[in-house]
Amino acid sequence: MAEYSAAFTGGSQTSKSKEARLLDILQRIRASASGYFAVHLHLSELRPSHRQPHFIRMAHRSIDSLVTKEDVQAFYLHNDDAILLCRNVQVDDVDDTVFRVRAIFHEDPLTQTEDGSADDRFSTWYDLAQQNDFKALEDAAIELAKKAAKVESKKGETSTGRASRTMQGEPLEPEMLTAINQKLLEARIGDLVRRQPAVIVSGKGKSKLAFREHFIAMEELRKRIAPKINIFASSWLFQYLSETIDMRILEVMSRLDFSQQESPVSINLNIPTISARPFQNFHAVVGKNTKNVVVEFQIIDIFSNIYAFNHARDWLQEHGYRVLIDGLNPLGLHFFDPSVLGADFMKMSWGPEISGGVGHDQTERIKEVVANMPSGGTVLARVDSEEGISWGLSQGIRCFQGHFTDKVVEAMMQKGAI
Amino acid sequence: MAKASTSQPTHHRRRTQEQLLLEYMYRLETRREGRLAVRISISELMPANKREHHIRAAINSFEGLVSDLQGQLFTLNNQDLFFVYKADAHHRVEDVGQKIKFLFGDDPLFDNQDEGEAKFIQWFDVENDYGELLKHIQELAEEKPEETKTKTRSNVRAQLKARQDHGSPLTPEILGRAVKALKRTDLSNLVRRQFVCSVNKKLIPEQIFSEIYISINDLRQTMLPEINLTSNRWLFQHLTESLDRRILSMLSKSDQFSFSGDISFNVNVSTILSPEFMQFDENISAAKRGSMVLELQPLDIFSDMGAFLFAREFVREKGYRLCLDGLNHQTMRMFDRARVGADFVKVHWSPELVDGGEETMERIQGMIEDAGKETVIMTRCDNRESVDYGRSVGIKMFQGHFIEQLIAEDDRRRQLLKLKHRIERS
């Protein structure tokens, strides 16, 4: 232990990891550990969808309220795990806190075992007065410290690399909007427009293109107009910017020749955009070929003014356009049926919360909603694996979009099947 | 303005009341003999006691005097009442003053009888103290200076009026300033309360819970009189997150805000997941959580479904109740209330419903049945028609100006009854 602890607790005080500090303290109390016990909360084993920063923060907050009242130290580790080190504290008090944290995640399978039972995967208790337990915690802490060090060094490697996927930068604030908006109006944008096909899968592996979505590569756009700002930090403020993005993408789309399009195109727009001048210009360019255009609206936009949506949908459909409702989540279909909105398509995203398994009741509901839509009218987007396709097919979904579909389409195009 | 409008609160017109009062004072200069004035300082009361229906009742109690041409009533921006009247009517005005004081009798302002009353009801002698009073009113009017001169062309006038009533559009810069200012502005004066009531056949209301909210119109008047805060939906939505936090911090100070009965308030999902909510939650007792209803907007639910599902479990586990707010007859049928995990749903009244005829009515009846009759609240009820229609489709709970009126009437009836019993006994 001594050499490990030296290895992992070295360095200046400020750069010490939580894991290293825990090891430090264990070292100090080793000789007189009576009255001490520890609880390890394995938050790192929650489902990814439950490990979002604000959820973890809520868990920390519950723990913090115990720390301020009792002789308890909390160590929040690099992998979201938490270890509570308690001295002469009533087990009941700690129990309460552990229970509260458990309750926060009560939907997660991890918490569905009884606290303190042999198969409890959520928490591990250590009586540090017992040598065995002390050793077990120490080993666990060393393991965690090793992992933390590895993660730390990896971070160093990739931060200069191009693969920093997490959104970085200062969160977007209202004061920044005008300047960003101006840049949005001025920036070159044509080269940032990407296309992604939505494919209808029919029996015997045959497929056909439903439409190609045209969209702006947001992360690249962000780098161009606001490299230091996380423009996605507030969904409302981002929506504000999206109204300007609409104008720009319509500009680009108006350069297309719609009589020559072999497959329909789709674009994401805000509802008020439909009655604005750039869309009317676009409408003139599309001319008689409106059946080749699908307009995608976000569900939050629809709820911000349902009457405006009704009006826009009627106008579009009367003129031959088709309307798609975007921004849905399969979990939401459990309590929400968008089929009454009278759209031609609805689109929902495949994600980890689905791949982890969905309850029977929910699956039945999703099937019902899909059945309420026109045939092929439900699109499962962001499909990155075959698993997504087979899940979708089992729900009655026939239209797919995402990286996995892209590859399929590519292969089919090579074979001349599309 | 001969009398305050009673059916609809016309917040945007209140702004000019100070100026109207000032103009009236100027006109009185040569005819001031035998004139008195009284100011009823509603603003001195605790926010929780400034119930809309009580204020309306207070305004109504001047009605008789106004229609008898005994005086003029002005409702100031801070809800204070200013009544200028002929000396002949002084006894009647004194009675009205006592009646209004009685309405708010349980406010701590009156813990010290005389001092409280002197603060609440101020008397002025217009004839003899004209100069002093004029100065006082000039100050009131200056607090909100009028920014435009009267134009003669009517279309310009109409445009100006629209802008004055609704304001210039909210820009990101103004939003930024507003968000910062909100952190330090005392909003307790802007807190309003409206009751959700069951209403029986005889239109007698029974209170179920009350919604606590910040009046957006009054907020605008106080902070940004020239700005239309709701002109851009996304910027406004951002502002509501700041308002949420202010409501939470106010509700945490239970010494100032002890609302009787169960209460509800609006929150964003992001607010529930914020440290401010955690803190709020830690400061209130478990029993209190059960008396609180959190109102969520569908827009917000869909903005981050994962966050909503998480927040929902969290607050339900803690014992709060949930209300799905802001639905109408079209959006309501898309939701399965029980599966959303909401204890209540609020659906807006709209006169359109009546136009829809039998078919709409049957569909709505079905919707109410599916959601559960005990869970649906019809909001924005401005008139009797809304309640009649709601009852005919099976709705039992209502909210809106009309309900506040019913409460005021019911209070009055009870008082009369009490008085009658007292007289009978003596």
Image (spheres, rainbow, N blue to C red):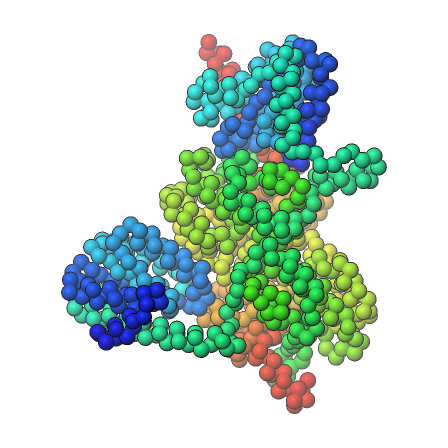
Residue occupying the point 56% across, 48% down: B179
Residue occupying the point 48% across, 14% down: B422
- In the rendered image of this protein, does residue B185 appear above or below residue A219? above
The picture quadrant where one finds residue B2 is: top right
Q: Position of residue B296 (x, y in %)?
A: 53, 50
Q: Position of residue B228 (x, y in %)?
A: 66, 44
**Foreground: B4 or A151?**
A151
Is residue B337 rendered to the left or right of residue A244? left
- In the rendered image of this protein, does residue B421 appear above or below residue A278? above
The picture quadrant where one finds residue B90 is: top right
Query: What is the quadrant of the N terminus of chain B in the image?
Result: top right
Is residue A136 rendered to the left or right of residue A310? left
**Foreground: B293 or A65?**
A65
- In the rendered image of this protein, does residue B381 appear above or below residue A388? above
Q: Position of residue A330 (x, y in %)?
A: 54, 66
Residue occupying the point 68% across, 75% down: A191
Query: Please, which residue is most extreme toward the front here?
Result: A12
Residue occupying the point 69% across, 20% down: B25
Task: Note whether residue B6 is visible.
Answer: no
**Foreground: A405 or B329?**
A405
Is residue B349 rendered to the left or right of residue A167? right
Query: Please, which residue is most extreme toward the right here?
Result: B153
